[in-house]
């Protein structure tokens, strides 16, 4: 309905891709494109509070499968990969950066919601070669455009 209601390009947050298997993520990307989307976000969370993230290797395989499906579409489809490590207990910026770098190598736009401060924003931006997606609106983890630009330029 949203795609048909506008002439603007539409991207959707497709959570964990509607399944665990890399093939499921790839199929989700294909179905998203068939529905008229020009992009989507897939995250590395399992949905289990006790063990919230996919194992590193499986998380990367899932994003790589989605990116491969996106490249095969015949038009520019933007796959954004969300590394959620900072949103759960025992956050590790190093683990988040490792995941983002692997997602970037797999062909996705990296995204880490919950970067705690401008130093973390700078660390993530410095570690990656692609533009980084940034979420605003999280209490005490949002920054102005000017602050973000400064963090990137450090």
Image (cartoon, rainbow, N blue to C red):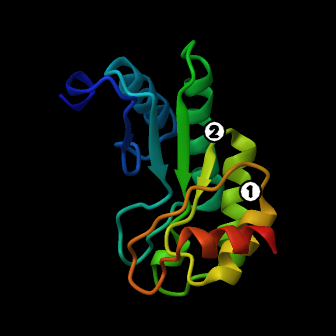
Residue 64's disc number: 2
125 or 61, which lies in front? 125
Residue 63: x and y in percent read 58, 43
Q: Residue 32, relative to residue 131: is it above or below?
A: above
Q: Quadrant location of residue 121?
A: bottom right
- Crowding near the residue tagged with mark 2, few <14, some 14–19, many ≥20 C-alpha atoms within 10 Å: many
* Residue at the image position 34 percent from the left and 43 percent from the top: 18
Secondary element under disc 1, as helix, strand or loop, is helix
Residue 32: x and y in percent read 37, 28
- Crowding near the residue tagged with mark 1, few <14, some 14–19, many ≥20 C-alpha atoms within 10 Å: many
Q: In the drawing, does residue 60 fall left or right of residue 49?
A: right
Residue 99: x and y in percent read 67, 61
Q: Quadrant location of residue 66?
A: top right
Residue 2: x and y in percent read 22, 32
Q: Which residue is mark 1?
A: 101
Mark 1, mark 2: which one is toward the viewer?
Answer: 1
* Residue at the image position 36 percent from the left and 18 percent from the top: 34
* Residue at the image position 40 percent from the left and 29 percent from the top: 9
Q: Residue 41, relative to residue 93: is it above or below?
A: above
Q: Residue 92, relative to residue 78: is it above or below?
A: below
* Residue at the image position 50 percent from the left and 68 percent from the top: 113
Residue 19's disc number: none
Secondary element under disc 2, as helix, strand or loop, is helix
139 or 71, which lies in front? 139
**Precedes in sequence: disc 1 or disc 2:** 2
CA gap between label 1 and label 2 equals 12 Å
Quadrant housing the C terminus: bottom right
Quadrant housing the N terminus: top left
């Amino acid at each position: 309905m949203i795609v048909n209601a506008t002439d603007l390009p539409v991207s959707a947050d497709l959570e964990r891709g509607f399944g665990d298997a890399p093939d499921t993520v790839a199929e989700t990307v294909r179905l998203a494109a068939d529905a008229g989307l020009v992009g989507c976000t897939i995250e590395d969370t399992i949905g289990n509070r006790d063990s919230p993230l996919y194992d590193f290797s499986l998380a990367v395989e899932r994003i790589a499968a989605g990116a491969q499906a996106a490249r095969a579409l015949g038009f520019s489809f933007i796959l954004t990969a969300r590394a959620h490590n900072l949103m759960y207990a025992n956050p590790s910026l190093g683990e988040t950066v490792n995941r983002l770098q692997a997602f970037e190598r797999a062909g996705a736009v990296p995204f880490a919601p919950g970067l705690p401060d401008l130093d973390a924003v700078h660390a993530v931006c410095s570690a990656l070669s692609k533009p980084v997606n940034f979420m605003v609106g999280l209490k005490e983890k949002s920054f102005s455009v000017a602050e973000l630009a400064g963090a990137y330029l450090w």
